[in-house]
Amino acid sequence: MMDENILMQVINSSSASIFMLDSDFNLIFSNDSSKKILLDYDLEYDFFKKQTNPFSFPVDFISKNIEVFSNGEKIPLKELKILDYIIEIDGHVSALMFENEIKGLSLSINKIKKIISSSQPKRRTFKIIRNLILEALFIQRKTINQVAKDINVNWRTVESHLTHLVGKKFVKEVFSSEYVRIFDITEEGRIKLGIEKHKARTESFLNLSSNNIRKSLDLDNNMDNLKTKDYEMSQEVQR
């Protein structure tokens, strides 16, 4: 039998996001990949704050599928509710068995494809959040807490994104102590921010131009229709 520590290392190093739930669907374990996939959609903080049935499984989910689970089979999942969000995923769920009894569920998510719907306002993507962090630091160097307040994102999420931005050399840590850490934007970060703003302005211009062209075409069509009606009326009068 595989050593428990080795087994945990294998689960933690898995590229799939693995969540283990007890028989009441409460979260009892999640691996490292699960935190990353939730962070990418800015769901991590709220998810781990609500560990009581965060996937909103119906109370009879295990009893309805007890035969499948007892045979050691997996149930493919295409959609899943996470908090107040309906998520399209590539994943499956199987039973956690102990002495031939179902003690809980193991949920494996290979990929979150998209957020289908939500009862909450649309979440900002990690790309938007990282651009907001760069904009906040563009004004002046700041602590994690200051950045979090400026962009209205929780401290933990900001820290994770700052780690990513430091790794990309868009941000640098200019001061660190036991009580405070201060970050500043780098020259590469300024260039990156400028490129992203240019892209946004270009997309906005293209959308505006496209709308204007459509309006212009609609106006031309309306004018043609009016001309046709005027001609038909003049023909009627002549008759």
Image: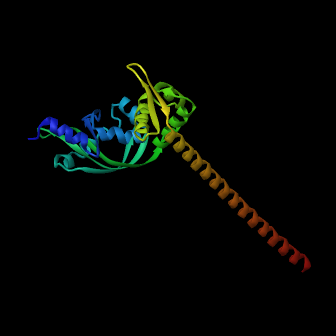
Q: For residue 48, which quarter of the picture? A: top left
Residue that protrudes farthest toward the front in the picture: 187
Observer-nearest of 1 and 166: 166
Above-or-below relation of 132 to 181: below
Name which residue lies at 57% across and 44% down: 194
Q: How is the image coloured?
A: rainbow
Residue 93 % position (x, y): 27, 46
Name which residue lies at 66% across and 53% down: 208
In the displayed structure, does residue 88 sit left or right of residue 109?
A: right
In the displayed structure, does residue 198 sit left or right of residue 7?
A: right
Observer-nearest of 133 and 87: 133
Q: For residue 4, which quarter of the picture? A: top left
Observer-nearest of 89 and 86: 89
Q: Quadrant of the N terminus?
A: top left
* Residue 55 is at least partly visible in this image: no
Above-or-below relation of 189 to 238: above
In the displayed structure, does residue 147 sit left or right of residue 81?
A: right
Q: Quadrant of the C terminus?
A: bottom right
Residue 137 % position (x, y): 53, 32
Name which residue lies at 35% across and 35% down: 54
In the displayed structure, does residue 133 sit left or right of residue 104?
A: right
* Residue 3 is at least partly visible in this image: yes
Residue 119 % position (x, y): 49, 39
Residue that protrudes farthest toward the left in the picture: 1
